[in-house]
């Protein structure tokens, strides 16, 4: 398999899993088929790893988990995680301001000094290991892109309504996403300076948080133009809660691949696996079989979603109103958004507003003569590759990839 074929995360992960299975089978002196049977059985019997399942908001959080102010009128509070309230985006521009951007931490925001921070680039896949300072990073060629970052569990809370059982993890609605202008150094610039070998296979960023979050990517993905080592967000230095001094931006890949507070890049000539793509960020449930070495199919990209810029279960006065929202997809531009104000009985087409940037989102709106009563607004998006939000999605225990059409409760008062 050529490395150029592995820019798609789903194909990359499957290829790496196949390679690992083959090497293990060979080392054990058993057939590959028998090895896969044994691995699948072991995965089914293993106890669920608790990593990544915390942060469900059931306990109060110490004040020092997050650096920036997170008042309740801006965010839903889930301890070290903070969900953006969509109504605060109504009437705003295309980008999410830094102060309103959602926060997803696996532990707490580390406090890192730029003067002492270093980025190590090492491993069997480079011929000249590097150690770069913050000033070194700032001196390299820079670029800026507008892209979204979305938590893999965005929409998790809706599994309970659909299936009557709660998925594990933070009970996000749809506010675990944000679009920003990210400025930084193309990752390929750093890899080139470290003497990237032609035999290199994977790059694994590692964070400096308490859990050392790390998730590998293919060399092909690492060399894409918009895969960056980011140090600025919306024209300002990267805030601590969003990865200061440097984070990874891996557009189109699931949120956890965008490692924050990165302090090390391992470049390997061998496939790399971690708990973040074997035990967690995988699909576990009755519709998903183990995919050794992972406990289930590994998450790759999200799918199209839509959200209304009105309060959840809120109230608005009757009369003619402009209802706004946003839709996004990792696969390209949104080409159509349909809406329903009668619980999905009839659908109409919303008006799309420029800009409509791939791997970001599009704003849309429609006019509505709102009469008093209780409503369940619905929206569904279709992207330029024909992907459309479905009516249902299968349940999985960790609550990932919920992108089905949902009913947004709203009361219109006289």
Image (spheres, rainbow, N blue to C red):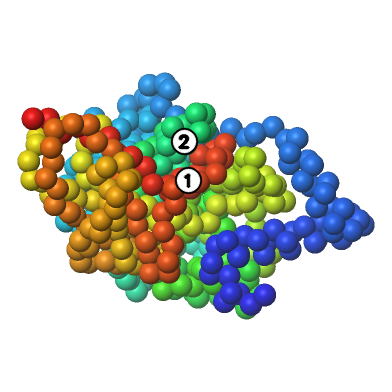
Seen at 44% across and 32% down, the residue is 161
Across and down, in percent, residue 277 comes to 60, 50
> In the rendered image, is residue 186 in sight?
no
Q: Which residue is mark 1?
A: 392
**Residue 313 placement: quadrant:** top left
Seen at 92% across and 57% down, the residue is 29
> In the rendered image, is residue 300 in sight?
yes
Across and down, in percent, residue 401 comes to 48, 48
In the rendered image, which quarter contains the N terminus? bottom right
* Residue 162 disc label: 2
Check the image and name the residue furthest to the right: 29
Seen from the viewer's position, the closer of residues 7 and 259 is 7
Across and down, in percent, residue 132 comes to 44, 62
**Residue at disc 1, secondary structure:** loop
Check the image and name the residue furthest to the front: 345
Mark 2, residues whose alpha carbon is within 10 Å: few (<14), some, or many (≥20)?
some
Across and down, in percent, residue 351 comes to 20, 61
Q: Is residue 247 left or right of residue 238?
A: right
Q: Is residue 360 above or below residue 62?
A: below
Q: How many marks?
A: 2
Who comes first in sequence, dot 1 or dot 2?
2
Seen at 20% across and 41% down, the residue is 310
* Residue 60 disc label: none
Give the Cα separation between the discs numbered 1 and 2: 8 Å
Q: Is residue 210 left or right of residue 177?
A: right
Q: Is residue 15 above or below residue 369?
A: below
Seen from the viewer's position, the closer of residues 153 and 127 is 153
Seen from the viewer's position, the closer of residues 388 and 9 is 388
**Residue 216 placement: quadrant:** bottom right
Q: Are marks 1 and 2 in contact (CB under 8 Å)?
A: yes
Seen at 57% across and 36% down, the residue is 397
């Amino acid at each position: 398999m050529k490395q150029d074929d592995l820019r798609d995360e789903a194909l990359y992960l499957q290829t790496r899993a196949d390679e690992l299975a083959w090497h293990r089978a060979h080392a054990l002196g058993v057939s590959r088929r028998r090895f896969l049977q044994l691995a699948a059985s072991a995965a089914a019997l293993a106890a669920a790893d608790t990593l990544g399942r915390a942060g469900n908001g059931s306990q109060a959080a110490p004040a020092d988990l997050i650096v920036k102010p997170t008042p309740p009128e801006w965010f839903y509070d889930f301890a070290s995680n903070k969900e953006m309230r969509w109504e605060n985006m109504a009437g705003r521009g295309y980008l999410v301001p830094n102060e309103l951007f959602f926060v997803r931490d696996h532990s707490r925001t580390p406090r890192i000094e730029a003067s002492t921070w270093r980025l190590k680039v090492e491993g069997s896949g480079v011929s000249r290991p590097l150690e770069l300072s913050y000033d070194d990073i700032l001196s390299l060629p820079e670029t800026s892109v507008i892209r979204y970052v979305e938590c893999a569990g965005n929409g998790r809370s809706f599994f309970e309504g659909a299936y009557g059982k709660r998925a594990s993890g933070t009970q996000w609605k749809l506010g675990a996403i944000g679009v920003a202008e990210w400025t930084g150094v193309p990752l390929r610039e750093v890899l080139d300076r470290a003497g990237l070998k032609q035999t290199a296979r994977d790059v694994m960023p590692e964070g400096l948080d308490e859990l050392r979050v790390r998730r590998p990517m293919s060399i092909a993905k690492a060399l894409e133009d918009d895969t960056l080592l980011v140090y600025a967000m919306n024209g300002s230095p990267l805030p601590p809660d969003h990865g200061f001094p440097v984070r990874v931006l891996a557009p189109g890949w699931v949120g956890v691949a965008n490692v924050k507070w990165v302090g090390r890049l391992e470049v390997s000539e061998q496939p790399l696996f971690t708990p973040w793509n074997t035990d967690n960020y995988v699909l576990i449930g009755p519709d998903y079989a183990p995919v050794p070495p992972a406990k289930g199919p590994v998450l790759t990209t999200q799918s199209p979603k839509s959200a209304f810029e009105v309060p959840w279960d809120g109230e608005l006065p009757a009369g003619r109103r402009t209802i706004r929202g946003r839709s996004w997809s990792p696969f390209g531009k949104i080409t159509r958004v349909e809406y329903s104000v009668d619980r999905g009985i009839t659908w109409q087409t919303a008006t799309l507003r420029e800009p409509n940037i791939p791997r970001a989102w599009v704003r849309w709106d429609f006019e509505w003569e709102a009469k008093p009563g209780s409503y369940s607004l619905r929206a569904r998006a279709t992207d330029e590759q024909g992907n459309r939000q479905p009516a249902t999605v299968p349940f999985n225990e960790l609550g990932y990839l919920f992108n089905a059409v949902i009913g947004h409760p709203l009361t219109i008062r006289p």
